[in-house]
Image: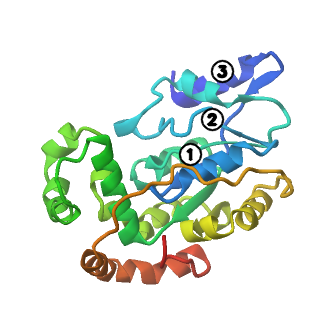
């Protein structure tokens, strides 16, 4: 039985304890280290929104599935009828090239939230995160960037890397334009709410009210806007940051057109 058949069968049978297994209609795509944990926290507090009980099931990324069984995945979305929005937040869906067509095949009416960040700072934060977890063994960010080309072109690294492959691609996984275009080729632009971490951090209530309107739920919900997963890493070398921003320049010039407006990608 394929995933679609499993979904329909379980949805039809699962009506227990006043709860119904629903299909997700919202995905917080990422990017990684751009505030998706805070976004997940804010969304799940809304009385009309059901987010998966844990943040990143990553079911639709074969290389990094946290939840592997289809029935277990869809059971994450058992909720009452008052929930208008049902979603999850797996950042791997943004960087993984194979995910967009699968989501489009199963959830053609889904909506998406995308949070972006200064790509040089985001790359550095991801490197520090991977070092902190013990997955990254290269002792400096500059060396890891230099190693990326070799890793990308080495089939054995894809096979043997100890965590999600794209989390070691510090530069490539920050090419937001390529990732957005993959989704825009399958979904209408109106199905996306795109913002920056600086915007969310600077005025969380203002931006979450906009997101709640985008999701057609009440903008007046009482939310605790305490940020989550705030990291305290040493500052990036200004020399490395400047070099990276030069490499990202052409990509950054395309982001306002793709996002439909200028984004604050200078800070955070």
Q: Nearer the viewer, residue 54 or 19?
A: 54
| Whole-number angstrom distance, CA of label 3 to CA of label 1 | 24 Å
Residue beneath disc 1: 89
| Whole-number angstrom distance, CA of label 2 to CA of label 1 | 8 Å
Query: Where in the figure is residue 173, as x and y percent of width and height?
Result: 35, 60
Give the image quarter of residue 143.
bottom left
Q: Colour scheme of this structure image?
A: rainbow
Residue beneath disc 2: 52
Query: How many C-alpha atoms fall within 10 Å of the one at disc 3: few (<14), some, or many (≥20)?
Result: few
Label 2–label 1 contact, CB within 8 A: yes
Please tell me how many numbered marks the rendered image carries. 3
Label 3–label 1 contact, CB within 8 A: no
Give the image quarter of residue 33.
bottom left
Is residue 5 visible in this depiction of the protein?
yes
Query: Where in the figure is residue 245, as x and y percent of width and height?
Result: 33, 79
Q: Is residue 88 above or below residue 20?
A: below
Task: Name the mark nearer the viewer: 3 or 1.
Answer: 1
At 23% from the left and 62% from the top, the residue drawn is 141
Name which of mark 2 and mark 3 comes first in the sequence.
Answer: 3
Residue beneath disc 3: 9
Q: Nearer the viewer, residue 73 or 267?
A: 267
Q: As drawn, is 159 to the left or to the right of 125?
A: left
Is residue 166 visible in this depiction of the protein?
no
């Amino acid at each position: 039985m394929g995933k679609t058949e499993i979904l329909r069968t379980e949805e039809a049978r699962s009506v227990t304890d006043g709860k119904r297994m629903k299909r997700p209609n919202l995905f917080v795509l990422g990017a990684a280290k751009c505030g998706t944990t805070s976004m997940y926290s804010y969304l799940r507090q809304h009385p009309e929104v059901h987010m998966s009980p844990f943040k990143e099931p990553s079911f639709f990324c074969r290389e990094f599935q946290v939840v592997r069984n289809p029935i277990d995945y869809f059971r994450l979305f058992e909720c009452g009828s008052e929930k208008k929005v049902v979603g999850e937040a797996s950042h791997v869906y943004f960087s993984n090239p194979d995910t967009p067509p699968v989501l489009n095949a199963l959830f053609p009416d889904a909506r998406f939230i995308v949070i972006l960040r200064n790509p040089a700072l985001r790359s550095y934060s991801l490197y520090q995160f991977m070092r902190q977890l013990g997955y990254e063994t290269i002792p400096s960010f500059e060396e890891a960037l230099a190693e990326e080309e070799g890793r990308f072109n080495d089939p054995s690294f894809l096979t043997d890397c100890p965590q999600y492959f794209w989390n070691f691609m510090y530069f490539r996984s920050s090419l937001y334009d390529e990732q957005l275009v993959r989704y825009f080729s399958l979904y209408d632009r109106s199905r996306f709410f795109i913002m920056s971490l600086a915007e969310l951090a600077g005025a969380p209530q203002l931006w979450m009210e906009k997101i709640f309107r985008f999701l057609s739920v009440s903008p007046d919900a009482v939310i605790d806007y305490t940020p989550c997963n705030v990291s305290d890493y040493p500052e990036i070398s200004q020399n490395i940051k400047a070099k990276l921003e030069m490499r990202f320049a052409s990509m950054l010039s395309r982001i306002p057109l793709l996002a439909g407006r200028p984004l604050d990608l200078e800070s955070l």
